[in-house]
Each structure stands twice: as structure tokens, then as C-alpha cells.
Amino acid sequence: MIDLAEQKELRKKAYLAIMFMGIVSMLGDIVYESGRGIAPDYLYFLGASAFLVGLTSGIGELVGYGVRLLSGPLADRSHMYWLFIFLGYGLIIAIPMMGLTNSIWLVAVFIIAERLGKALRSPSRDAVLSVVSKGLGSGKAFGLHEFIDQIGAVVGPAFLGLMMIWTVNNFNISLQSLFPFYLLMMVVLYLTYRRIKGTVEEIRWQSTATNEKLSRGFWMYSGAVLMNTVGLIPIALILYNGAKILESGGQLWLVPFLYVIVQLVDAPMALVSGYFYDKIGIRFLALPFVLSILPIVFSTLVGLLGVILACIAYGIVLGMQESIYRATVSDIVPLGRRGSAYGFFNVLLGVGTFISGVVFGFMLDISVSPILMFGFVIVAQTVAVALLLGTKQEKLKDQ
């Protein structure tokens, strides 16, 4: 039995470890979210066609999600979680490197390289987070990590925007100004490794589950998240609607601030949902599944207010998606298979995002009736909730 003093010490270590991992992610977000925001503009400035911009983005996302099928299992089999984390964060250097070239093709390569880094680090980082959260609760752990992470997602693009104003739209200097953040991120990552590697190693070698198959419950849960994502209109299309509304008044500069609304809602929601997930359990995920209906409802309203409400609703779901969705994986998958599980899980999340973009984009282009769109969303979320309930039953059987 663990006495109260030992329990407090475990919680303290968990909070410190998550804070360190969160700061690394925050600094990473300052760099790569800035790059993701400015890359299309930079390619356009260099003379790239819309097709090339779209192709580069598509290949980047395909690499960013697809490679996780390899990086997750490889991390489990090799036990080299930290190697994948260092390689993944190291490739973020591709973003400030874009400021050193005016070649369209090199910029495209750098964009794809950053997404490769995301694919390498994400499964291993989430596996490490699931380990260091012992004694705290996976919901709180992933919620706190996401909250800190989102600070960077807001600060980074805002900083780069100010740099663009200060340098009178000089892309090279603005991108190069991200180098100090990258260097600081790598230093903090090294310090984090030195501080918590012992905890991870100690628990890792206790795991004997590396050859076990992923459970039926895991696949049902991943299917639930896939369907939930398929029925959630992408933020890009919400912003697209906002741009159409704002264009007539010459207010397109407001569109990035709509995205900031999403990020500002995302951060506190990650913390709140993490707390309730630890109290209620997997059943709590039914809430974001149901709330995923709201963004499309608000998006079809006339005027800017509908777009703002859609952004708020999307931010609420996104905060849960990026915290407790990941936390659930750690609760239903053995330690020795979590790298693989997060790899497969993230791939299905990416597939869902791709399908939703194609389906909703097509429906908007051909002006499908809002009733048909609502019907599609409701069917998708109903299937998602049904699979979630099945996951709950499978989890009870395993206990």
C-alpha cells in the first residue's frame, strides 16, 4: 500500500514531468504552428501555384499521419522512445530553415520534413506522457499538457505576425527569428529527458506486453473516434465560410483572429475535460461526440455570428479531442503497446479528418441542403456513440 506521503510525492513528480513535457511542446508549437500558418503565403509569394500549395500540404499531412504506423510500433519494439522524440522535435528546425532559401521546392521539402518530425515524435511522446502521469490520472495529465501546448499555438502565430509587420512583410527575417525558440526547445527537451528518463525506464522494463495484440476495445474506440471526426466539419471550412462573409467588406484580415478564438477555447477546455474524464471515465466522451453536431449547425447560420459560434463550438470539441481522446488510449492499452496504439490511433484520426474535409467540402461546393448535412453529421455521431458504448463494455470485460 502507498501511504499518503508517497502518494503526494508521486503526484508532485507527475506534475513536474508533465510541466516539462508541456513546455517542450509549447516551444515546439511556437515554431511549427507559426510555420504552418505562414507557409502557404510564403509559397504564394515565391510564385507557387495553388495546386502546388495544396499538393505540398496534402503530402505533408499524409506523411504526418501515415508514418505513425511505423514510428509507433518501432518505438515499442526498440524501446527507443526518447530517440524518436528527439528526432521528431529536431526536425522542427525545418521551419526556421525555410527563411534561408527562396526556392519553392526547398520550402516544400522543409514543410514535409516538419510533418515527418510530427509523425516520429507523437506516438512516443504520448506513450511517455501516459507513463509519467502515474499517480495523477491520464485525463488531468493529457489535459494539462494540451493546455500548456496551446499557449504556444496562440503565441507563435501572433509573434510571427508581429515580425511580419515589423519587417514590412520580410518572410526570410521573420522565419529566421524562430531559431532562438527552436534552440530553447531542444535545451528544455534535453533537461526534460535528464529529469524523467529514470521514471520511464523503470516502468518500461516492467512491461511484458510488447507482443500482445491490440484489444477489440481499442479498435472499437478508434472506430468511434474515426466516425466522430468524419462527422465534424473541419476548421478550415468554417474559416472558409468566414472569409466569404468578410470578403465583401474588405475585412479578410479578421479571418486569422477567428482561428485564435478556436485556440483560446481549446486550452481551458483541455484542462476542464481532463478533470471530468478522470471523475466519470470513458462515458464522458459521449459529450464531445454530441457537441460535434454544433459546428455544422452554427456554420449554416447567416452572418458572422454563426461563424464565431461555430469556432467556439469547434474549439470545445478540439480541446477534448487533443486531451482526453489521447488519455483514453492509455487507459485501454497495455504499457508495452502504447507506442503502436498511438500510431494506429493517430492514423485513423487523420483518415477521419481527410474524409470530413472531402465530404463537407463537396457538400458546400454543390450547396447541399443544410438538412442533408445535419443528417450526415447525426448519423456519423450516432455510430460514434454506439461504438463508444461498445468500448465501455469491452473495457468492463477486461477488468
Image: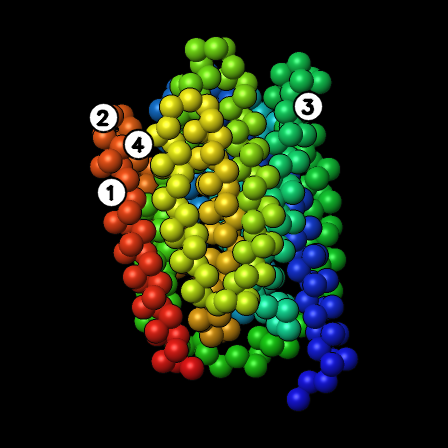
Mark toward the start of the polypeptide (4 vs 1): 4
Mark toward the start of the polypeptide (1 vs 3): 3
| Residue at position x 70%, y 70% in the image | 11
For the residues marked 3 and 2, what is the alpha-carbon distance in whole angstroms? 39 Å
For the residues marked 3 and 4, what is the alpha-carbon distance in whole angstroms? 33 Å
Q: Quadrant of residue 238?
A: top left
Q: Give the camera-side residue of 281 and 59.
A: 281
- Whole-percent x and y of residue 194? 73, 63
Q: Give the camera-side residue of 106 and 167.
A: 167
For the residues marked 4 and 1, what is the alpha-carbon distance in whole angstroms? 16 Å
- Whole-percent x and y of residue 349? 39, 51
Q: Which disc, if any, is residue 361?
A: 4
Reply above or below: 156 against 293: above
**Disc 1 versus disc 3: nearer the observer:** 1
Reply above or below: 89 against 217: above
Residue labelled with disc 1? 375
Q: Give the camera-side residue of 300 and 259.
A: 300
Residue labelled with disc 3? 163
- Whole-percent x and y of residue 266? 55, 44
Quarter of the image with the C terminus in it = bottom left
- Left or right of 349? Residue 382 is left
- Whole-percent x and y of residue 367? 24, 25
The amino acid type of the residue labelled 2 equals Ile
**Disc 3 versus disc 4: nearer the observer:** 4
Mark toward the start of the polypeptide (1 vs 2): 2
Q: Which disc, if any, is residue 366?
A: 2
Mark toward the start of the polypeptide (3 vs 2): 3
Mark toward the start of the polypeptide (3 vs 4): 3
| Residue at position x 68%, y 23% in the image | 163
The amino acid type of the residue labelled 4 equals Gly
Extreme top residue here? 249
For the residues marked 1 and 3, what is the alpha-carbon distance in whole angstroms? 45 Å
